Every structure is written in C-alpha cells, then in structure tokens.
Amino acid sequence: MIGILFYGALGLGLIGLAWLIKGETAEYAGFTRRRALNAAVLLCLFTVMTGVAALRIDVGNDYGNYVNTFHEIYVGGYVVTEPGFNLAVRLVYLLAGGENYLLVFGLFAAATSFLFLKAMYEQSVDFALSFTLFMLLGLYFRTFNTVRYYLVLAVSLYSLRYVLRKEYGKYVLLICATALFHKSVLVVIPLYLIAALPWKKWQIGLGAVFAASLPLFRDFWTEVALRLYPSYQNTIYLEKDVGLGESLAAILRCAAVLALAAAVWREAVQKDRANLFYLKLNLLGLAVYLCTSFLPLVTRIGYYLITPHILLVPGLLAPLPPGRKRKLAYGAVFLFALANFAYFLLTASGEGVRVLPYHTWIFTEREWLNGSYIF
C-alpha cells in the first residue's frame, strides 16, 4: 500500500509540475523568462524521474537477470544481448574501476528519461497533456523493466519526427544504430513507413486479410518470427500465449483512441498529416494485439505502435474550439487515463511487471553495493 501511495503521489506531483510548462510566445531566439521557466521545470522533471529510477534496487521484473548479464559481459561470458549494449556496460565498468551495476541502471535511466522528455517537449502540441498520459498510462514506471527495450522505445518515439519530415535516410540510420542496443526496434522501420504511406481501400482490405491470416496460420508465422528473432527458440516464451485477455487493456486503449478520433475527425484528423499518421499506427497496434497474441512477447511490438498515443491524443484535442465538445473530450481522456493509472497501480506487483514494492539501495545492506550480491 505504501508503494501504491508513493507512485500515486509521485505521478500526480510530476504531472502538476509539468502543467507549469507553457508555449513560448517570443518570436525571436532569445532566452526569455518563459523559456527559462520551462527549462527549469524540465530539469526538475528529469532529475526526479532519473533519481527515482536510479535509486531503485530489485525493482523490475528482470532486475536480477540484468545484474547477472552485466556480470557476464564484464567477465567475458556468454550473453544474448546486443553488441552496443555490451560495449556500453564494459565501458561503464571500466570507468568505474569494477562492477557497479547501480551506475549502469542509473545511466540508462537518465538516457531514457531524457529521450522521452525531449520527444514529448519537441513533438507534442501540448507537452503537459503528453506528460500526463506518459505517467497515467504507466509508461514511466514500466521503464524500470527491460532497460534496453525502453531506451530504444524512447528513441523510436523520437524518430517519428524524421518520418513526418520524410527524412527517411536519417530515420533508418537512427533505428539501425539503436538496434545495437535492442534489435526488436528494427520492426519499426517497415511499420512506421507503412503508416506514413497514403492508404487506399484495396490496401486496407489486403492488410485486413493478412492480419486475419496470422492467427489462422499461427505455426507458420511463429516459425517466420523465430527465424527473424532466433534468441526465443526453445525458450519458455514460446509456451506463453498471452491471449486477448492479457492484451485487453491495450485493445481497449486503441479502441478508445479510435472513438476519440472519430468524434473529432473533421476538426483534428481529416487535414492533419501528423494525427493521421499516428492514427494509422494505432490501427496497426490494434491489429497486432488482436491477431498476434500467440507470438512471444508480442507486447514489445505493440508498444512501438501505441506509445505515440501520448502525441496523438493531444493532437486530437488541441484543435477543438472552446465549448461543450472540448470539455467532454478532455474529461473523457482524463477519466480514462486515471482509470488506467489505478489499474496499473493495482497490478504493478504482478508477474511481468513487478515494479512494486519499491526498494532503494540507500537503505539496503552494504553487500548490495559492493557487487558481491548477484541474483
């Protein structure tokens, strides 16, 4: 209960701080009072987010596995992690003069927090609302898990700017470089580019047929997936069919976003290229969750497609003129996000998440800190 109250207070406190950030009205490139305040708030958000993540110990479903992986990388053992990640760990341990996994977790926390904040601040039409969704949808707290994945997820969110600008060379190079830390990110190259294309009715129909074929020929598509990602071969992940029940929260979220987009189509989607692009990603995400539950760790693919919700939803609400429709839309979004946050907090200690209870190494026995404790 204490952990739930801590996360709740942390989330709502940071959200309140984020709403101090306002648009910069000065037309010249000087450092105005408003820009100074925005920078101070962003620095505060970054410091708290990084601090809470860096001070944790044994928080996250795979925290212990990562400690073991860091050790194996350091001693030259066998690991399945990507070369860029391995090099980063070796470099940190070299500079630290020995094994210091707390420092590695801290640096990854800082990089992940920075990239998410930068993407939201520079790419959202309403940073405060984007940050609110980032916290209430549980994205920040989930970064305590799978540090490689959430780092590349932040990069994938940042990379959307290059797709929208049609700077595809920069986009592909960035994603390929990021794949040195978690190769699953390569999946966004075709998916994001597909969403950037103008869709015709026959293409939508063909896509629907393809999506329907996935669960019907699951053995074939599982084999294809394993050829692309062989590290899952002969693992327990193949025995886990998350099912629609496990993906229900994501499916409901995608459906809610579709309903919101339909309600504001004329004002916010019809002539807005960015919103239409993000909405196509939402449709692809919905198809992934509905049709590929049999694939190992399908949520990793899905999150690449639905994390842009934190950019899309503000984009859908911002063009609405003052009035009853705007109030209803904002109210519905906040109620849905709060309900999602409550559900997340109630399930945050469960298998696959385990970000509760929260422990910090500040109050932990010394053997955790000198590297002698390995999970």
Image (cartoon, grey):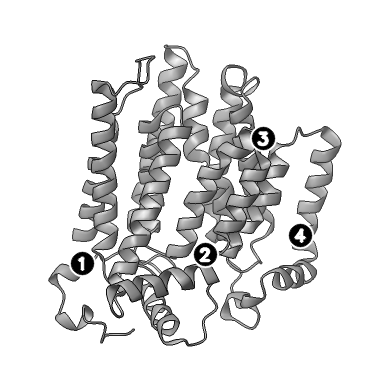
Distance between mark 3 and mark 1 Cα atoms: 44 Å
Distance between mark 2 and mark 4 Cα atoms: 28 Å
Distance between mark 4 and mark 3 Cα atoms: 30 Å
- Residue 73 vs residue 214, the one in the foreground: 73
The numbered mark, 1 or 2, whose residue comes first in the sequence reads: 2
The numbered mark, 2 or 3, whose residue comes first in the sequence reads: 3
Q: Is residue 303 left or right of residue 295?
A: left
Nearest to the eye among marks 2 and 4: give it: 2
Q: Looking at the picture, how far across and down is residue 283, in whole percent? A: 65, 42
The numbered mark, 4 or 3, whose residue comes first in the sequence reads: 3
> Circle 1 is placed at which residue position?
360
Q: Looking at the picture, how far across and down is residue 141, in whole percent? A: 35, 55
Q: Element under label 3?
A: loop
Q: Element under label 1?
A: loop
- Which residue is found at the position 82% from the left and 49% from the top? 209
The numbered mark, 2 or 4, whose residue comes first in the sequence reads: 2
Distance between mark 2 and mark 3 Cα atoms: 25 Å
Q: Looking at the picture, how far across and down is residue 356, in whole percent? A: 29, 64
Give the numbered dot on residue 181. Answer: 2
> Circle 3 is placed at which residue position?
166
